[in-house]
Image: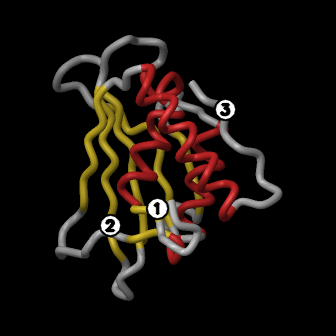
Amino acid sequence: MNPDENQNFEQIMESAIVVAWPDLIHGSDDGVVHVEYGFAPDGMLDHLQIWSSIIRGVWHLSCEYWMSASDLHGVGVRFLNAYRSEDLARILELVMQHQDSFTLPVDLGRPGLIAIAAPTQTQSLEAAATMADAFNRLGAGMAQPVAA
């Protein structure tokens, strides 16, 4: 990747989910993860939610990240329903706080959705390399996530 070229937000989020896959799917070999995201009026990302499913049709809110606080939530990352991932927390902090370093999707006036199926070993290695590149470009001094 050209150092002056921005990485695509949806690609970086897919890589983030693949890196954190074991934490989101709790050891299952199968499953699906959805990342839903929404925009603020200024066109920047306001929030994202990560939903995990091991059983078809049964979804659990795993994690969310908010850029602004409300009476219902604070700013930053929050894990729910017994999910936890230090790697994913670091990645989300990096991505959400450096949005201008990524090519954001077009705000179509509705939430966006990224669906990620169980990764192959090759996809896991590629995701780890993508995340290492993002941390090298943006996260000086931050611990890089560990590959799954």
Residue placed under numbered mark 1 in the picture: 72
Q: Which mark is residue 38?
A: 2
Q: Secondary structure at mark 3?
A: loop
Q: Nearer the viewer, residue 132 or 110?
A: 132
Q: Nearer the viewer, residue 97 or 11?
A: 11
Q: Secondary structure at mark 1?
A: loop
Q: Nearer the viewer, residue 65 or 31?
A: 31
Q: Disc 2 vs disc 3: which is toward the camera?
A: 3
Tell me where residue 25 appears, x and y as whole percent: 42, 22
User: In the rendered structure, are the residues bearing label 2 and label 1 in contact, judged by CB atoms less than 8 Å apart?
Assistant: no
Q: How many neighbours does mark 2 have within 10 angstroms: few (below 14), some (14-19), or many (20 or more)?
A: many
Q: Disc 2 vs disc 1: which is toward the camera?
A: 2
Q: Residue at x 59, y 50 (%)?
A: 91
Tell me where residue 144 appears, x and y as whole percent: 71, 44
User: In the rendered structure, are the residues bearing label 1 and label 3 in contact, judged by CB atoms less than 8 Å apart?
Assistant: no
Query: Amino acid type of disc 3?
Result: Val
Tell me where residue 30 appears, x and y as whole percent: 31, 15
Residue that sits furthest to the bottom in the current view? 42
Q: Residue at x 66, y 32 (%)?
A: 146
Tell me where residue 114 appears, x and y as whole percent: 28, 48
Q: CA distance from mark 1 to mark 3?
A: 32 Å
Query: Amino acid type of disc 1?
Result: Leu
Q: Is residue 31 left or right of residue 21?
A: left
111 shown above or below 26: below
Among the two numbered marks 1 and 3 on one chain, the one whose residue lies closer to the N terminus = 1
Whether residue 87 can be seen here: yes
Whether residue 70 can be seen here: no
Residue that sits furthest to the right in the current view? 141
Residue placed under numbered mark 3 in the picture: 146
